[in-house]
Amino acid sequence: MTFPPKFKSLIPALVLSVCLATGCGKFYDFKGISIPAEVNTFVVEPFVFLDAQCQAGMEVIVSEKLRAVIRNQSRLVNNEEDPDISFSGQVSSCSTTYVAPTEGSTTSLNRYEISIKVIYQNNKDEEDKWSKNYSAFQDFDSNGDFQSLQDDLIETILNDIIDRVFNDSFTNW
């Protein structure tokens, strides 16, 4: 089959479009992940628990979420013996505050906030290390039962924080 000359220049774009639409374009990662070729392993050290106001086991939840995101969104393999990249940190605080006062000294909204500190170290490159504080919050109806809402609030807040930790670690944003 022959194509007129003016259509021949459209063939590469058409092939690329079909590949991307059918999934054969998975050879390229659009997330912007940038991990040096010599880095293949990671470890997430157990986070330290500093605030008694946090739900018991919060440090385990943070460590497991970070470990799962790295495992699922990168090519890195967990290795506790000799990791190329290591993460550690602490759950600094968990707090509930009032954010929307109403008449009669009550509030209509409360805010649950979690703060953590993350320490990142690339063991293959001594200069590639940092320590950052992360914080996120979710507002919730003050008439709701905090105990029944807490798990969902923690899930949403930690998803936000862990996504930012991942992006700071592995993307060039």
Image: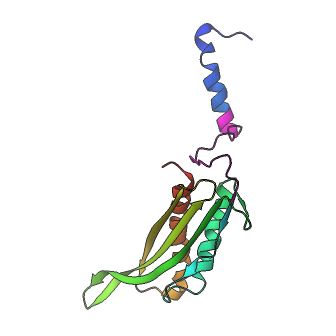
- Range of the magenta residues? 19-41
Whether residue 49 sits left or right of residue 37 in the image: it is: left
The residue located at (43%, 83%) in the rendering is 95
The spot of residue 150 in percent (x, y) is 53, 82
Vertical placement of residue 38 versus 18, above or below: below
Q: Quadrant of residue 124?
A: bottom right
Q: Quadrant of residue 47?
A: bottom right
Magenta stretch containing residue 172, yes or no?
no
The spot of residue 15 in percent (x, y) is 67, 26
The residue located at (62%, 73%) in the rendering is 63
The spot of residue 135 in percent (x, y) is 44, 71
View extreme (left): residue? 103
Whether residue 173 sits left or right of residue 46 in the image: it is: left
Count how many numbered circles sit on residues in the image: 0
Q: Nearer the viewer, residue 135 or 87?
A: 87
Vertical placement of residue 154 versus 120, above or below: below
Q: What secondary structure do most residues of the magenta stretch adopt?
A: loop
The residue located at (53%, 76%) in the rendering is 90
Q: Quadrant of residue 151?
A: bottom right
Vertical placement of residue 116 versus 24, above or below: below
The residue located at (59%, 49%) in the rendering is 33
The spot of residue 133 in percent (x, y) is 45, 69
